[in-house]
Each structure stands twice: as C-alpha cells, then as structure tokens.
Amino acid sequence: MLVLSMNPKQKYGPTALVTGASSGIGEAFARELAEAGFRVILVARRTDLLDKLAHDIESIPGAEALVISADLGKTEDVDRLLEAVESEEIGLFVSSAGFGSSGPFETLSVDSEVDMVRVNCEATVQLTHAIGSKMLHRKRGGVVLIASLLGWQGVPGTATYSATKGFVQCFAEALHTEWKPGGVDVISCAPGPVLSQFDSRANMTISNGVTPETVARQTLAALGKRTTVIPGALSKFLSFALLHCPRALRVAILKKVMDGLTNYGKPHTGR
C-alpha cells in the first residue's frame, strides 16, 4: 500500500485516470491509487481484465472504479475517451498504455511499429494536453508519464520502442518545468527491466527486474519532488553504470543486453 506524507487525493483531486490499466505497471498504479482513496478510471483495450480489476478495487471499502475500453492506437477511441471523461475532475493522470517490439527493424511489421508510435507518443500527447489543460485551469494536478531507461539512447533491436520512450522522457522533462508554476506536477518514470506482461508482446524474456508494484509506489512517492524517478535497485544500478559512458558506448552495451533478452532468432521453447 502507498504510504505518503501528504494526502495525494487532497492535493491533486478526487479522480485518477490510468491508461494501460489492464495489467503490469498500469494495473499496479490503479490499485495503489484506489488504496490511497482515489476514484479510479481504468482504461485499456481488454474490457474483461478491466472489469476484473474494477471488481477487486471495489472490494476496498469506499473505493470506486469506472471502466472505459479504448484502443489508444485509434484516434477515434482517444476522442471517445476524452468525451467520456469531459465532466470528470481528473486530479491525477497516469499514462501507462504502451507496448514494444524487438528484432531487426526491417523484419518487423511496419503497421505495428507505426501503431506503437501512435500509442506511446501520439495518444500520450493528446491525452496529456486535454487533461493537463484542465489541471492548469484548476491550478492543481499530477501527471505520470511512463518512459524507460531504453529511451536515453537508441537501442539496436528495439529501435522504435527506444525512440518512443526517448520522446516521452523529453516531453515529461519539459512539462515538469512548464507546468510546475501552474500547480501541476509532472514526473517521468524511467524503469529498467520490469516483471510484467510487456515482455511477451515485445518478444522478450525478462527474468530479473523490478515489480510493477515497486514502480508504482516509488513513482507516486517521488511525484512533486523530482523530474524523473528510476524505480528499483537494478534500474538504478544500470542507470549509474551507463551514466558516464559515451553515448555510442551506451548504444553498444544496450545492444548486448537486448541480444540477451530478446527471443528473435532463438529456438522456440514451447512455452
């Protein structure tokens, strides 16, 4: 359970909207925020998983959850989501929806890679602009944008994903400074390997990493205090180890790391 020195619901507002809430980091944020007293709006593609999460959340005394199914790779779904929450006072926005891929760029589906840019970048910009503008008008709010250590340089084997997360990191850093005087806290969460379902869709195998619960708790504890949070001991170690390396060397090192994590070109194990 999230333990903070201040009451985040009182500071930011009554309702939190979490995209990518059906699993992994997004689900962990939704559970933590519900425990902290927020009414949570759960957004993802999988209605069945969202309904199950909403049922779990509403077993918490006084907790309330609203489910909105949306594919953020579709502009019409983003528009429909914004219309559905038009009258909501969203005090905290967690942009956790996103996915990755792995493999030589030219072998990957270009449609899927472009869809990744739409979900990881375009939808993030559209939702942050709409929701954040209302926060600025109220002079309070919080925005959590999920980046990645892979976004601090290009990473061979996951070229599009690392580029999208580089975008998110820069976007969060800029908004942190722009919106702070207006009463809106913005933070970038930049984890390393995370033990979630992300690796399955990205065709990767991650056996050592930070839990989604740790990501959510450490990020919420740092919101309003820092520009970027790097959750988990392993992520902090990787960040420190790469910090003083020339950019080209970081690219080469992370290529080796990705070669060990990705499944392309490896025999199928039947799992």
Image: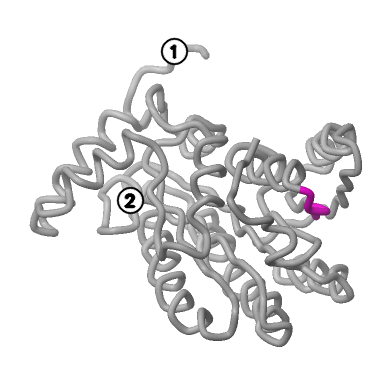
Mark nearer the viewer, 1 or 2: 2
The amino acid marked with disc number 1 is Thr
Residue at (74%, 41%) from the top-left corner?
35
Residue 124 percent location from the top left of the image: 58, 67
In space, the residues marked 1 and 2 are separated at their CA atoms by 27 Å
Q: Residue furthest front?
A: 5
| Residue stretch rendered in magenta on the structure | 37-41
Residue 22: assigned label: none
The amino acid marked with disc number 2 is Leu
Left or right, 155 with reference to 37: left
Left or right, 201 with reference to 127: left
Q: Of callouts 1 and 2, which one flags the residue occurring earlier in the amino acid sequence? A: 2
Residue 56 percent location from the top left of the image: 83, 32
Residue at (65%, 77%) from the top-left corner?
132
Residue at (49%, 30%) from the top-left corner?
195
Name the residue nearer the viewer: 33 or 43: 33
User: Secondary structure under badge 2?
Assistant: helix
Quadrant in which the N terminus appears: top right
Residue 213 percent location from the top left of the image: 57, 35
**Residue holding disc 1:** 269
Question: Which image quadrant for residue 260?
Answer: top left
Is 248 above or below relative to 197?
A: below
**Label 1: how many Cα within 10 Å (few below 14, some 14–19, many 20+):** few
**Label 2: how many Cα within 10 Å (few below 14, some 14–19, many 20+):** many
User: Secondary structure under badge 1?
Assistant: loop
**Residue holding disc 2:** 150
Name the residue nearer the viewer: 1 or 49: 1
